[in-house]
Amino acid sequence: MTLHIGQRASRTRTIGDADIRAFAQASGDTNAVHLDEAAAAASRFGRRIAHGMLTASMISALLGNDLPGPGTIYLSQELRFRAPVFIDDTITATVELTQYREDKRIATFRTTVVNQHGVLVLEGEAVVIAPG
């Protein structure tokens, strides 16, 4: 695959209760704001939210499967969580190539996730080694 500055890829999915519970099981993050209705209702969010890292995992899926694709190796990921993701939110993760060092195959991507209302919920930057 030839990479060029400005190249983008996106993935969209709806985050459900089962996704949150499976992520809690896999990660060990059983914070009540993710799993307990009463505790979440008393939180600043007023209801249960998805794990931030569950949201961020969509970026990993994009990089490893779509752009640059299979064989990609993560070097770093910067994340800034801007808004919560609630159960049944539909979120779209996007990566956009901003820098590419062809001799070392090091690619830098702007990473964003927005919800179904266009609200930015996560932003950051990923640096990867692109497949050869």
Image: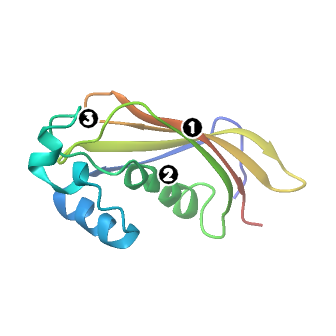
- For the point 29% across and 62% down, the residue is 30
Please give the label number shown on residue 116: 3
Q: Earlier in the sequence, mark 2 or mark 3?
A: 2
Counting from the top left corner in percent of width and height, residue 92 is at 37, 43
Asked where in the image residue 105 lies, by quadrant, the reply is: bottom right
Q: From mark 2 to mark 1, how far is it between C-alphas?
A: 10 Å
Of residue 29 and residue 20, the one placed in the foreground of this image is 29
Identified by mark 3, the residue type is Gln
Task: State how far apart marks 1 and 3 are (Cα).
Answer: 19 Å
Q: In which quarter of the image is the N terminus?
A: bottom right
| Helix, strand or loop under label 2 | helix
Q: Residue 43: horizontal and vertical position, in percent?
A: 20, 37
Q: Do the residues labelled 2 and 3 touch (CB within 8 Å)?
A: no
Q: Do the residues labelled 2 and 1 touch (CB within 8 Å)?
A: yes
Q: Is residue 131 above or below residue 128?
A: below
For image coordinates 23% across by 53% down, the residue present is 32
Mark 2: few/some/many CA within 10 Å (<14, 14-19, 20+)? many
Q: Mark 2 points at which residue?
A: 59
Q: Mark 1 points at which residue?
A: 124
- In the image, what residue type sits under mark 2? Ile
* Residue 33 visible in the displayed image: yes
Res. 69 mark: none
What quarter of the picture does the C terminus occupy?
Answer: bottom right
Q: What residue type is labelled 1?
A: Gly
* Residue shown at 56% from the left, 63% from the top: 64
